[in-house]
Image (cartoon, rainbow, N blue to C red):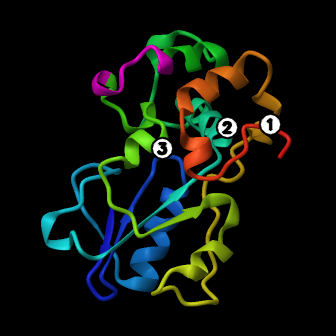
Amino acid sequence: MIISKAHQFVFISTPKCGTNTMYRVLPEHFGGERVPPGFHRNTVPPEYADWFTWTIVRNPYARAVSIWWSTTVNPNNKRYCYKELGTTDFATFLRYLLGRPAALAGRSLDLNQSAWLRPVRLDRIVKLESLPGGLEVLPFWRSGITLPWLNASDGRGDWRQYIDDTTGPLIREWAGDDFDRYGYSQNVGE
């Protein structure tokens, strides 16, 4: 979570939705301060409850691939790890997520976006796929800010190559209403 007292906004970081980029841009350009504890937080402190609150969401298919890749395949990721799986198979990973009740998950990455953002009042939701233009609708945003695309080239390629007759239905089950709630098609080709 990033809070900017100068611009009276709260940025709720949705895991695997541009957090590293925003954690660099918001302090640099808007005086944002990271609110501990942890990297991701979805509970707004009461003193900021009426401030402009926003987040970034991502295509549920692309997000599922990103979570899987960064937690099971990427050898450089030390923050998150699902070593208990004993495999890097994508379908096995998705079944693992589906088998963990949200109340017991304990990791923000286990949750779909709707579950993660459920406790938050949001004034604006921006899609990762529409950045940087999507940020222009924010009341405090200034044009001309260059976004550093962090974690963009980690070797996994296009997310669509990982969606098939097995993984597609598993993602749709796990992501639940993320598709409708945030305006994403369940058709992989769109």
Whole-angstrom CA distance, mark 2 to mark 3, is 12 Å
Image depth: mark 1 or mark 3 in front: 3
**Residue 123 pos. (x, y %):** 41, 70
Looking at this view, name the residue that lies furthest to the top: 86
Quadrant for residue 172, please give it: top right
112 magenta-colored? no
| Depicted 4 relative to depicted 143: above or below | above
Q: Amino acid at mark 1?
A: Arg
99 magenta-colored? yes
Residue at the image position 30 percent from the left and 29 percent from the top: 106
Instruction: Give neighbour class at mark 1: few <14, some 14-19, many 20+ (Cα, 10 Å).
Output: few
Q: Is residue 7 visible in the rendered structure shown here?
A: yes
Residue at the image position 62 percent from the left and 69 percent from the top: 148
Q: Is residue 98 left or right of residue 68?
A: left
**Residue 71 pos. (x, y %):** 52, 30
Q: Is residue 110 left or right of residue 145?
A: left
Q: Which residue is mark 3?
A: 113
Q: Is residue 89 visible in the rendered structure shown here?
A: no
Foreground: 154 or 112? 112
Sequence order check, earlier mark of 2 and 3: 2
Sequence order check, earlier mark of 1 and 3: 3
Foreground: 144 or 117? 117
| Depicted 185 relative to depicted 23: above or below | above
Main secondary structure type of the part rendered in magenta: helix
| Depicted 140 relative to depicted 23: above or below | below
Q: Which residue is mark 2?
A: 61
Whole-angstrom CA distance, mark 2 to mark 1, is 8 Å
Magenta stretch: give its range.
97-104
Q: Which residue is mark 1?
A: 160
